């Protein structure tokens, strides 16, 4: 018996020598794997992996994050985000609300009274309250707009949150954004646009993450949402939804070579826009984007909407909720969207044909689509249901993706994405 006890104790010694909480693998110098979507094209995407020790920083406040970003400089840098950073704070860490930004006499009630379409009409808002709104909006932008420059890795450590910020990758290249919960890019000062959509609409300024003229960008294991101030809880103004948020992720202004993987888009109206206008000026030959193993939960529309570009959409998981659902996949003028092995879960009132919306689109490749557990031919069903109102889409998008990871069946991907997509779930 004594010998057996000694043997057990010897076997346990290596385990007892381990720290109580083993450190998670440091992913801050990770680079995009070869062939992992369009961002792997050419030299690939390495972010700030070449940063020297002086440019590897851990930040816990908005002021520290702004300093680390260095005004969007090109210096190779790794910025590790720890804890929760609120962009609506001053340099001393004091929380700022909308009243702190208001200036020049701006008053929400006065703004609504001034531009009520029943008295103002359909003209663009002008005058003291609109001037005050613009000045107030500029003050908020000084706080919440944070520019991410070239050769940067922005990565969360543990449970890392950036809320209230509009992260902008503008005219920058070689950027990695990983393992972050990006939430609630809340606009205090939306503008009324009387002629938008025929009935007028509210326009907001901020996306959680905006790629504008950006190239070689990898977005991975990021959670995007409005958590904290969901638009569904906002009142209506002038009989229109009083939106406070724009997109979750916009990829516009001739951005190119982007991979978005293992991320989660939740409880929002317009999730992802690829291409910023209905004419291809500046966008033609650009906007090559891969979206794989992402979850779209409670998204009303734009998951994604593709105006232009070669977009590969594979192994994504869609959970449609709510009565305000419009569509998931938007096909526009010169889009060349190649969709394969995506899984959709919808309530009973949603039809297969509802998953796609076309704005003068001409083509959509789809294969391997799973709808509530059943394989469907999405393109054939869409054309059959919409032949009286929209032109048929052809299956030939003019290209075949070659840069991609293993493409699983829609069923296998559905299970894997449910377990692994979003911040805090990267291996």
Image (cartoon, rainbow, N blue to C red):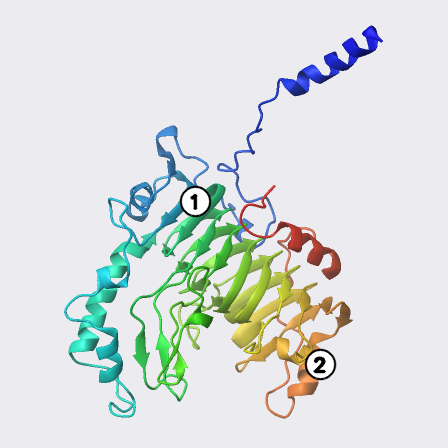
Q: Label 1's element?
A: strand
Residue 232, given in percent of the width and then of the height, sits at 46, 72
**Which residue is rendered at x = 38% and y = 35% of the image?**
57
From the image, which quarter does the C terminus lie in? top right
Of all residues shown, which one is farthest toward the right? 1
Q: Residues within 10 Å of mark 1 (few under 14, many from 20)?
A: many
Residues at marks 2 and 1 touching, judged by CB atoms closer than 8 Å: no
Q: Residue at x 60, y 45 (%)?
A: 34
Query: What is the x, y in percent for residue 414?
Result: 69, 58
The answer to whether any part of residue 197 appears in the image is yes
**Residue 377 x %, y %:** 74, 74
Q: Residue at x 59, y 88 (%)?
A: 390
Spatial CA span between label 2 and label 1: 42 Å
Considering only vertical position in the picture, is 290 above or below 178?
Answer: below
**Residue 235 is drawn in which quadrant?**
bottom left
Determine which of the numbered discs, if any, sits on residue 154 in the image: 1
Task: Relative to 66, say whether 330 is above or below.
Answer: below
Is 216 drawn above or below residue 122 in the view shown?
above
Total labels: the figure holds 2
Residue 185 sits in quarter: bottom left
Question: Closer to the N terminus: mark 2 or mark 1?
Answer: 1
Q: Which residue is mark 2?
A: 381
Position of 135 with respect to 404 (left or right) is left
Residue 372, by quadrant, is bottom right
Report the front residue among 383 and 97. Answer: 97
């Amino acid at each position: 018996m004594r010998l057996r006890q000694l043997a057990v104790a010897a076997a346990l010694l290596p385990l007892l020598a381990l720290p109580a909480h083993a450190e998670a693998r440091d992913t801050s110098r990770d680079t995009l794997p070869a062939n992992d979507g369009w961002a792997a094209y050419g030299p690939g995407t390495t972010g700030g992996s070449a940063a020297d020790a002086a440019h590897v920083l851990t930040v816990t406040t908005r002021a520290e994050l702004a300093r680390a970003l260095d005004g969007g400089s090109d210096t190779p840098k790794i910025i590790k985000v720890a804890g929760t950073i609120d962009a609506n704070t001053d340099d001393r860490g004091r929380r700022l609300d909308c009243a702190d930004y208001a200036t020049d006499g701006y008053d929400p009630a006065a703004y609504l009274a001034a531009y009520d379409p029943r008295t103002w009409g359909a003209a663009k808002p002008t005058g003291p309250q609109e001037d005050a709104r613009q000045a107030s909006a500029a003050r908020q932008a000084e706080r919440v707009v944070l520019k991410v420059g070239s050769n940067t890795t922005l990565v969360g450590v543990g449970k890392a949150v950036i809320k209230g910020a509009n992260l902008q990758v503008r005219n920058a290249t070689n950027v990695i954004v990983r393992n972050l919960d990006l939430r609630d890019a809340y606009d205090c000062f939306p503008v009324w646009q009387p002629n938008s959509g025929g009935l007028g609409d509210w326009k907001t300024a901020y996306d959680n993450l905006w790629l504008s003229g950006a190239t070689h960008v990898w977005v991975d294991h990021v959670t995007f949402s409005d958590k904290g101030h969901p638009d569904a809880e906002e009142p209506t103004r002038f009989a229109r939804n009083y939106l406070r948020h724009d997109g979750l992720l916009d990829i516009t202004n001739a951005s190119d070579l982007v991979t978005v993987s293992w991320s989660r888009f939740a409880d929002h109206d317009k999730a992802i826009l690829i291409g910023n206008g209905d004419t291809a000026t500046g966008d033609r030959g650009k906007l090559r984007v891969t979206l794989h193993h992402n979850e779209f939960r409670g998204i009303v529309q734009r998951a994604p909407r593709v105006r232009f570009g070669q977009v590969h959409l594979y192994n994504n998981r869609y959970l449609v909720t709510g009565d305000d659902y419009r569509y998931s996949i938007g096909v526009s003028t010169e889009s060349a969207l190649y969709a394969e092995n995506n899984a959709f879960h919808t309530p009973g009132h949603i039809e297969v044909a509802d998953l796609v919306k076309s704005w003068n689109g001409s083509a959509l490749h789809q294969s391997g689509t799973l709808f509530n557990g059943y394989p469907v031919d999405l393109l054939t069903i869409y054309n059959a249901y919409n032949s009286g109102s929209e032109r048929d889409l052809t299956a030939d998008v003019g290209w075949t993706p070659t840069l991609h990871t293993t493409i699983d069946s829609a069923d296998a991907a559905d299970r894997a994405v449910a377990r692994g997509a979003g911040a805090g779930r990267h291996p």
